[in-house]
Image (cartoon, grey):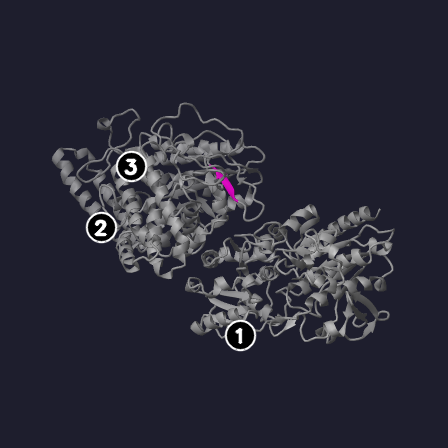
Amino acid sequence: MSKPFTLPTIDGETPMVVHLAAEYYPYARTGGLAEAAWGLHRDQARSGLQTMAIMPLYRTVQQHLRRPVPIGDSFTLQFGDRTETFRLWQDLEPASETPTCFIAHAGFFDRAGLYGEGGADYPDNYLRFAAFAAAAVAALPRITSGPVLLHAHDWHAALAPVYLRQWWGGDPWFDRIPVVLSVHNGGYQGHFGREVMPEIGLPWSLWTADKLEWYGKTNYLKGGLTHCDMATTVSPTHAEELRTPAGGFGLQEVFEWMGDRFTGVLNGIDQDVWDPASDTQIAAPYSAANLDAKQASKAALQRHFGLPENPFIPVVGLVGRMATQKGLDIVVHNTALFHFAAQYVFMGSGDRRLEQGVQGLHHAMPSRIGVETVFSDALEHVVIAGSDLLLMPSQYEPCGLTQMRAQRYGTIPVARRVGGLADTIDDGLTGFLFDAFDERALVGGMWRALTEHRSPRAWRQMQCEAMSREFGWDQAAGRYIEIYERAIALSDGRTR
Amino acid sequence: MSLRFVLTLHSHLPWVLNRERWPHGSDWICEAALDSYLPLVAMLEMLERERVMHPITLGITPILAAQFAHPAFRHELDYYFAHRLETIAEAADSLRLTGDTDLLALVPYWQRHVLRLRETWQRIDKDLIGAFRRHAEGGRLELISSGATHGFLPLLGRDESIRLQLLVGRAEHGRHFGELPRGCWVPECAYRPAGEWHPLPDAPHHDGPRVGIEDHLRHAGFQWFFADSHMVEAGEAFDPYSNLPRKRPATAGKRSPYRAYRVGNARRGRPIDVLVRDPVSTEQVWSRYGGYPGDPHYLEFHKIRQPGGLKLWRVTGSDVDLGAKRRYEPDEANASTVRHAQHFQELLDNISAGAGPDDGIIAAPFDTELFGHWWFEGIEFLQHLYERFGSGAAAVHALPAGQALAEAPAELALQLKSGSWGKDGDFSMWLNPETEWTWRRLWGIEERFWRAVPHVLSLGDARLILEQAARMLLLAQSSDWQFIISTGAAGDYATKRFNEHCAGLEALLPYLEMPSPDLAAGAELADRLHAVDDPFPELFGAIAAASDIPE
């Protein structure tokens, strides 16, 4: 049971927390954003806050809706010389713990993909997500007549505070809305040509170095950061990284300028779904008290990937997007890594070049390396439960969820000391961290882990320590309450 | 609540196999095996038979373990046994010839003694590793490790070198004994905290402060280590090797030595604890003046009968010169060990009775070789001590270090002071005008080695050259070379050995540094060096892990 939370009032009433996100579980998901926004929302709702989420009504969302009903009539917004019509929907059934509304616009969102198709982004994404942000703000009075605290996630929703202040500024109800912006992945900022400014209905007066302009482009995330009250990212270490030239993705000066209005809060995981003692998707349940039963999951994993069933050889799992950011480049060509007596299991999809790289490894060492280039939730459970080690050699990792799930399953992460990995893995205690982003450092980290694995007592102790770690949303939700309080206070000061 | 007593024996010898035997060389390890390691095994077996628990924390340095496991050691010790028995057999005639017939009775004593040890050696299948491992698996020993070759960590020029010593040290221990150790015998108890590093004006430059030794211990996976009492301001510096009596009795410091402390205050990662050497109980054993080994009935170490190499006399008195030493009487010596075991146990009980409410542990670390080798009757003393513990005579509880720490965990964090358990409590035994040149040479090759590593690790073909180079670096880093040079005895041997290892590395380095090395020639050289110096079979992963230093 989540701890009850209370928020300060706005004009005598407790505000509703409204999350704006381009992805939201279970309706649309390509990465960690959907689950993070949903997880936080769910914990807040369970803690007694009045909450709502707003997301685009993509084609993929429609399959999840049972009894969709519109909220009010269609409404129009003017973007330059374009008039766009939107409608707000919600699903009445099943009653959700996390009430969600959908912004419908057939032209923008009723498409096969969320962001693009065939490996290419939609060319009008600048307009689609500007429109989503503006329409979501416009829809707020249809959701509640009481006060609202807006919590926007990532660049897709980052223009919401810009529209809020620019289009609705001067309206006392809108002026009282505090805005928090969460940066889940600072590497994606939504930057487009300068020419989009009139098309998205924003004046040139905002195209300045202290607002939306960024190296001659229009940067949505920068717009959000310069217009919100508080901003967060998904781990304390990543918050520090974003303030540095090496880790700020060109926005370090903005993060630095925000001072203590920008902070890091670790995401949580759903510990009910990720619990080896009750997981029905794995070969046999297990817990820290009967870790021997994890062996059944290991055997099942080896069978699934066509690897020899051997309880003694360590199995190293690598799960997730096959992308440069995830460090696949220092894995695929790392001959020293494959000198270790271990089996490797790769599961995930992404960059064609990297997918081919791991397939090549499989063909060269079929009895040592298994590959599945289609990501599935069910198989993620199988890989995490069945592996001894989980490899996360990320170039950067704002938060990361897999390493938390792995620890709950007694699967020891070997990861780079960046972002959320540094904040959630205790080096030498619940996993192994390495520093440099190169093949040598990865081999060093893996060697330390495999050395530990050869020592049954030490390994068991490490597994138990990892499994005892708490990664639920409670702590994050509590930190967000503090951030919301600060945002409300800042908003108070602004409108007084 | 009575205190816990943690007896720790630290066993170490530098790499002496595949080289000379006598006077300096493999005879060192054979002598230590006969004097200390095999008698220790025999004692453990006897206590096991008598069902007496003997919780000892036993440190075996990785370089010593590598020698125990080496086929050359088995061969050397077999030869040494045969030679010893041969010379003992000849001793009787020699004594008759010189008219020393009153000493004849000791010849069969030594014969029986060596034969019993040879039986032990054969009973354990000439496998000291296996013997100690069996006792550890039975919960009667806690095994701990150390730096790979007992490198003097605070004076190593590169953090990568410190990491390599500790990473290899822990992993090699796991390879030999089946489980990774929690405890580390930090070589010479030598520690320095985080800070600027300028041991000599021309030492390599570091931008900013270097991290403390505890960070490297944590990275390698160790959980606790030992420090001398002055390093936690719990007593005066100690010199176990001093031939001089202490000028005044050990005095108390501002902190208690009878508790473990947490070192540093790292926000994350495994905490590192330190156990403090108890100045009182350890001095009782270490000291030649007033300590047990100086008892008149114990075997005189320095007087040896040649030919035959037999020790036949007793200490007789501290002021008695070698010519006036009297015949050794084993039964009288044994009676002294019984008396001393009782005295030591009562001393521990007295310490415990006077301890403060937050005190929990009496830690008494010694060199293993003190027992049996330097103090011939030391092993018997230990046996009687554990028999007393087993009989319930003692108020203190003997426990292995890990269990004592679990029962009396460190609660107070402190910043340990720089120091060692050597002369004057500082680094001067290892860094002084006689040894400065060794450090300059070592720092230079450290720099070259670690500069080459990132490039070489990406060249799979250079792996064997790199590993042999690392072996030579580790062997050159043994603290023994500087220690022996400083003591003046066998200094030529230590100098020669240090120079040989440095030269081996210097010969290999060009193959690691050149942009297009002749790898075949490098591999041939590495092979040649490996034929002599071949401890630590796998070093590649440890080199990679050691070289990953945070910016």
Looking at the picture, do discs 3 and 2 lie on one chain?
yes
In which quarter of the view is residue A82 placed?
bottom right
Q: Chain of mark 1?
A: A
Comparing labels 1 and 2, the label whose residue is closer to the camera = 1
- Looking at this view, is A42 or A387 the one in front? A42
In three-dimensional space, the C-alpha distance between marks 1 and 2, rounded to whole angstroms, equals: 56 Å
The x, y position of residue B453, in whole percent, is 40, 53
Q: Quadrant of residue A273?
A: bottom right
**Which residue is pictured at 33% across the width and 54% down the height?**
B514
**B197 above or below A23?**
above
Mark with earlier residue (3, 2):
2
The residue at the point 46 percent across, 59 percent down is A439
Name the spot of residue B431 as percent of width and height, x first. Answer: 36, 34
| Residue identifier under label 3 | B330
Have a look at marks 1 and 3 and say if they share a chain: no
Mark on residue B413?
none
Residue drawn at 87 percent across, 51 percent down: A11
Q: How many residues crowd around disc 3 within 10 Å: few (fewer than 14), some, or many (20 or more)?
A: some
Badge 1 amino acid: His
Q: Classify 10 Å Cα crowding around label 1: few (below 14), some (14-19), many (20 and above).
A: some
Q: Is residue A384 left or right of residue B442?
A: right
Proximity of marks 1 and 3: CB atoms separated by less than 8 Å:
no
Q: Which residues are magenta?
A: B272-276
Q: Amino acid at mark 2?
A: Tyr
Total numbered labels: 3
Name the residue beneath numbered marker 1.
A304
The reply to whether residue A362 is visible in this rendering is: yes
For the residues labelled 1 and 3, the Cα–Cα distance comes to 70 Å
Quadrant where the N terminus of chain B is found in the figure:
top right
Q: Tell me, yes or no, whether the highlighted magenta stretch contains residue A450.
A: no
Q: Which residue is mark 2?
A: B79
